[in-house]
Image: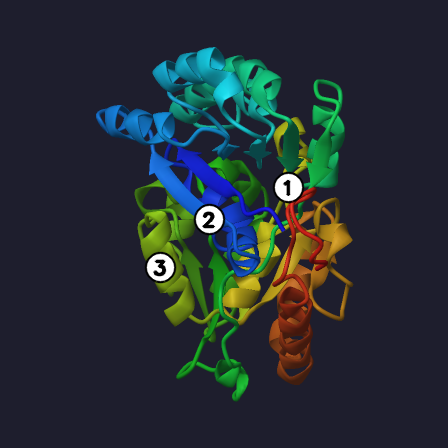
Amino acid sequence: MQHERWLVLSDGARPTEDIYFLESVAPRLRSEGHDIGRLDVRGWRWRLARWVLSRQPGANLVLCRTLPEPVLRWLERERGAFGRILYLIDDDLGAAAEDKALPGAYRERMFRAAAQQPRLLALADEVVACSSLLAELLREDHDNVGLMTPPMIAPLPDLAHFDAGPSGERPWRIGFYGTRAHLSDLEHIAPALYSVQRERGDTELELMLGQHAPSDLAALPRTLCPAPLPWKKFRDYQARRRVHIGLAPLMDTSFNHGKSFIKFLDIAAMGGVGIYSDRAPYTEIVEHGVNGLLSNDDPAEWRRCLMSLLANPMKTHRMAVEAAKTAQKHELYALPGLTNVDA
């Protein structure tokens, strides 16, 4: 077997890098004798990274989402010095730039990223997308697009927090751990959360949005709004924190059409059962009533799902067990075209 060198050129998209390569595919490549590295190419680090790259002729490169402009220009000039280039993408950048429901600063960043993307596609031998709908979209612009749905890279916890049903002394935690990009999705189901938190005294609501949490939701009883965490700290928090019910609303928008089912894995990593919007990508992994619940967009249906899970703790526990089993099946993945390891 020919041993190869793979280098991730990092523009700071650590979640994408870790989930889709460094903590999933890279260990498999190392086990086959390949050499894996990561180069931070942002700002002043680029000078050192360029020196390293100049001494790695024939190395294969992994690009995630974006590159700093000076790095992209250099790579366009030096493309012939390297082997294969893979481009990993986990968002529809163009749709994000045009979605007026998203925060303005985020849209501006996505606009710049979308403008750069055709050049990255031109450099890539293969594009790897995180969802079937995003892959289908990218096939309009590239002849070689592979699909890699998110792998499970977090450890699965025990489910001891389900030993007792919800009570005032031991309330069940309902958690939302989406970013601000999904704030409008959360706001859509807010009436369900108002109802549950006001009617019951045995639930705790956690919204990891900090100061960006909707004020009406933040003011509800037994509601926590911890600030969003950087990726590494969030991984640590996720490993310690337990949730009973996770919320993953995903409204019917062009931006959301490109999303993966990563939130299913996030909720399983915290020991929870999720309520998910009844559309792709969640319909690809959730079996309603078995490893989670699927809901239409009516807040009344989200309330019904919440009440059902709270009223049937033993059934909810069984669903959490099944969700963990489903997540575990997604632990081993191969990046398309790289290895022969199947999920």
- Labels 3 and 1: the sequence-earlier one: 1
Name the residue nearer the viewer: 281 or 20.
20
**Which amino acid lies under the numbered mark 3 shown in the image of this protein?**
Leu
- Residue 18: x, y in percent? 46, 49
Q: Which residue is mark 2?
A: 35
In this rendering, would 254 be left or right of 106?
A: right
Count of picture labels? 3
Judged by depth in the image, the label closer to the viewer, 2 or 1, is: 2
**Which amino acid lies under the numbered mark 1 shown in the image of this protein?**
Cys
Name the residue nearer the viewer: 193 or 275.
275
- Labels 3 and 2: the sequence-earlier one: 2
Vertical side of 175 occupied by 167: above or below: below
- Residue 212: x, y in percent? 36, 40
Q: Secondary structure at mark 1?
A: loop
Q: Which residue is mark 3?
A: 224
Report the residue at 69% width, 43% height from top.
336
**Quarter-of-image position of residue 326:** bottom right
